[in-house]
């Protein structure tokens, strides 16, 4: 019975870390944050819990080319008006601190970008640049020069 309780505490700690973050986190980042509540949490448990939480639909995997997977809390509005699609959003990747943030907006259909006769079924968009923290730090350094 204690094993089940520990699993619940571990899962709750991971969920709180995900929900308390305004960005997608690596498993290592999640482990470090959740260890503030459950000191014995380890990375293999984090991966097991993330897999289970993905199956439940409360955690979403974020993939960026050339990067390890990150995870974010699933959006509250996971389905469209027809109830059959996941909430669609994009991401911003900071090239300095390597953090990834959700962008809850979409430029719309990408059909006009596809070659003639092609049909776009879905798209992923990642913006790359400096987040607010890194942009402010860079501006402060430039101003000091």
Image (tube, grey):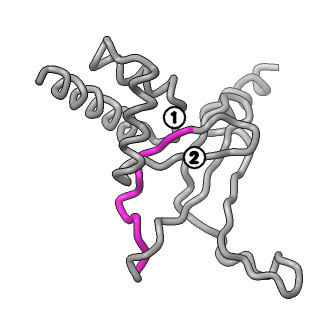
Looking at the picture, does residue 19 appear above or below residue 4?
below
Dot 2: within a 10 Å radius of its alpha carbon, few (fewer than 14), some, or many (20 or more) residues? some
**Camera-side residue: 74 or 139?**
74
Against 80, is 87 above or below? above
The number of numbered discs placed on residues in the rendered structure image is 2
- Res. 47 mark: none
**Which residue sits at x=72%, y=77%?**
120
Ranked by sequence position, the earlier of labels 1 and 2 is 1
The magenta segment is: 70-81
Locate residue 46, reporting x and y percent. 41, 27
The residue located at (19%, 22%) in the rendering is 3
Is residue 95 positioned above or below 142 on the image? below
Label 1 SS? loop
- The main secondary structure of the magenta stretch is loop
Q: Position of residue 81 (x, y in %)?
A: 40, 81
Q: Which mark is residue 62?
A: 2
Rendering coords of residue 139 (x, y %): 73, 31
Residue 44, how many percent across, how many down?
45, 22
Seen from the viewer's position, the closer of residues 141 and 126 is 126
Which residue in the structure is indicated by mark 1? 25
Q: Quadrant location of residue 37?
A: top left
Residue, far left: 1
| Residue 141 highlighted magenta (yes or no) | no
In-front residue for pair 51/25? 51
Q: From the viewer's perspective, tell me whether residue 9 is left or right of residue 15.
A: left
Hey, which residue is sitting farthest top in the picture? 40
């Amino acid at each position: 019975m204690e094993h089940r309780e520990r699993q619940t505490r571990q899962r709750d700690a991971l969920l709180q870390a995900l929900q308390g973050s305004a960005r997608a986190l690596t498993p290592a980042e999640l482990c470090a944050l959740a260890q503030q509540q459950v000191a014995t949490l380890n990375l293999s448990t984090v991966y097991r819990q993330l897999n289970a939480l993905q199956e439940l639909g409360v955690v979403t995997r974020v993939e960026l080319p050339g990067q390890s997977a990150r995870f974010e809390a699933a959006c509250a509005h996971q389905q469209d008006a027809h109830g059959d699609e996941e909430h669609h959003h994009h991401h911003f990747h900071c090239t300095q601190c390597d953090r990834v943030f959700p962008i809850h907006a979409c430029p719309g259909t990408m059909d006009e970008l596809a070659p003639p006769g092609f049909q776009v079924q879905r798209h992923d968009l990642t913006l790359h640049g400096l987040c607010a923290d890194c942009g402010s730090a860079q501006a402060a350094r430039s101003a000091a020069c």
